[in-house]
Image: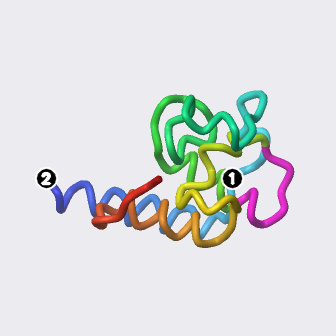
Amino acid sequence: MKKIRALAVITAFAVLTVCGTMTAAALTDGGSTSPDEKELSVIGDLNGDGKLNMVDYGLMRAYLAGKSVTIDLAAADVDNNGEINDGDRVLMQAYMAGADVELK
């Protein structure tokens, strides 16, 4: 089962890499929250659907690239260092790939 999940994650990352970031219209779902609201957010759930998945990863990439996307800022700081940066993206990617990492 882990091999199938890993293959699905790798395939999804390949699709994102080949196609680039998703369009802002496909990724946004409403308002954003501030870092003070972190306790109400699912860590890494940038679009507020209650789960961390490839859509959230695509949103993170788009946000870091300066695209105009709406994200949950509190959920985006997955290493809880007060900044949203490439370190958060890498940590999200590792977590979704099944690595033993902790999202804070």
Q: At 57% across and 62% down in the image, what residue appears?
A: 16
For label 2, the residue is: 1
* x 58%, y 65%: residue: 89
In the rendering, at what x and y percent does residue 39 appear? Answer: 55, 34
Mark closer to the chain start, 1 or 2: 2
Secondary element under disc 2, as helix, strand or loop, is: loop
Residue that badge 1 annotates: 22
| Residue type of the residue flagged with mark 2 | Met
Q: Nearer the viewer, residue 37 or 88?
A: 37
What's the coloring here?
Answer: rainbow
What is the spatial separation of the Cα atoms under label 1 and label 2, in whole angstroms? 28 Å
Residue 10 percent location from the top left of the image: 38, 66
Q: Is residue 31 above or below residue 19?
A: above
In the rendered image, residue 28 lying in the magenta stretch gets the answer: no
User: Of 94 and 6, which appears nearest the observer?
Assistant: 94
**In-image side of 90 versus 5 (left or right):** right
Point 60% across, 39% down: residue? 38
Q: Amino acid at mark 1?
A: Met
Q: Magenta part of the protein: which range?
A: 62-69
37 displayed left or right of 16: right
